[in-house]
Image: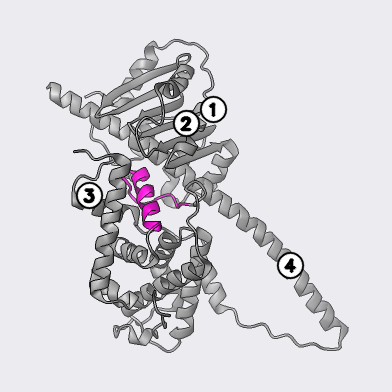
Amino acid sequence: MMRLQKPHELDDALREAFRRVDPPPGFADRVVRRASQSPVRTTIGTRAWLRWAAAAVLVMAVSGGLWYRAEERRRVEGEEARRQVLLSLQIAGSKLNAVQMKINRHEESRQ
Amino acid sequence: MKPIIGAAALTLAFSSNLLAQSFQIPDRIEQLAPKARESVNITLDGPLLQLASQFMGANEQEVKQLVSNLKAVHVRSFEFDREGQFSDADVESVRVQLRTGWSRIIDTREEGEHVEIYVKRDKEQLGGVVILSAERRELAIVHIDGPINLKQLSLLGGHLGIPVIPR
Amino acid sequence: MLPEPADPAPETAGHEQAEGLGFEDLVRRHQRMVFSLAFHFLRDRAVAEEVSQDVFLRLHRHLDGLDLGNGVVHWLRRVTSNRCIDYARQRRFRLLSFDSTPEPAVEARTRDPLLSRRLRRLVASLPRQSRMVVILRYQEDLMPEEIARILDTPVASVKSQLHRALRTLRDKMLRVVGDPR
């Protein structure tokens, strides 16, 4: 691991560690959607078709919600897997490059 | 200057054609985790790698391509509070698996850090990479299983925050 | 303890104009900043999204009929910081274990990902206000005066917190990697 020998190196390392990151995909869309939703007004009527219509909406909302939760789970798992892949390759890449730098230094010292 | 990729090609030309053994993180390495102040534990098999690929962004297509054919990725990385928390025998338990079917293309020691890179031949290309890095208070093992192109991996420099090393 | 913050109305946060910028534009323009503040402070992606959404919904409620410009950035930083600190205080947020903390993979150009993770974890162990001071300083590259305005705290306090936090981080990093001297 890099040794923070000079004061500015800690500053630099902190800036790198706290660089801005992207929110989850679709974040802006979800915010805009929530902001645009207006309260749902329900009227309770005596007509059967109104009751059936309300029940149908409820069923759709519930099943849609279940589907959404399953999709959300998949999204979370997929994003986590993506993060781990990228971190793995970063670690591998940084080790490869550290070795490459050593090789370069060794070759230069021989010249 | 001898780039790593060149070293790998040279080694492969003379390496034996023995069937490479599959590599597994030894149990005694897994048992280091409780002693570590910090640890990274990543295990990604084929299905998870495929799932991860589906979530790669537009600026991660090279990563997606590199990952697309991989079978697995394992990372174990430990940072300890003090020296002496892992032994030579722990590191040797990793090396012993890599003596058959693997070629060590890099072995460097500098300032207390010992880094070894092993590659596995699979027909005409690399079938896997193991990076073994041991410092006084840190041990890291990266195993990438599957067709891997070291040049492709090194070219990811600049895309994943890995500085591009001039050749 | 941070006093209960009152979210400033956006119109008092700046006088610059932002003609033509609708709510969606503002969300897309500033989502990284808001989410990053929340994520780096709370270290939980789902909670960070929840808090970030809440911040933007508050903006939406204040937005109608108002002109916003660069002042919206200050407003967003302030509201996000306050919401994060409140959330942490109310929920008694505990630092998750390293392996279970969902870290976003850094699109950042991180030269040493392990060092970055280590630093983020150390910062997460700081007191809430100090933690936010460090994050505002290094994520947003803000000077202590601006941080003081965002957190409604005296500048001297911010400087003192920052100085102590950096000293703590340096000491802890030296213990891990060893004093090279």
Count the numbered circles shown.
4
Quarter occupied by residue C139 = bottom left
The residue indicated by pointer 1 is B27
The residue indicated by pointer 3 is A9
The residue indicated by pointer 2 is B144
Q: Residue at x 20, y 44 (%)?
A: A5
Question: How much space separates mark 2 and mark 1, taking CA atoms?
Answer: 18 Å
Q: Position of residue A45 (x, y in %)?
A: 82, 88
Quarter occupied by residue C76 = bottom left
Element at badge 3? Answer: helix
Q: Residue at x 46, y 35 (%)?
A: B76
Question: How much space separates mark 4 and mark 3, taking CA atoms?
Answer: 53 Å
The residue mark sitting in front, 4 or 3, is 3
Q: Position of residue B17 (x, y in %)?
A: 47, 11
| Magenta span of residues | C103-125
Have a look at marks 4 and 1 and say if they share a chain.
no
The residue mark sitting in front, 2 or 3, is 3
Tell me which numbered mark, 2 or 1, is placed earlier along the sequence. Answer: 1
- The chain identifier of the residue carrying mark 3 reads A
The residue indicated by pointer 4 is A62
Q: Position of residue B32 (x, y in %)?
A: 47, 33
Please tell me which residue lies in front, A78 or A33.
Answer: A78
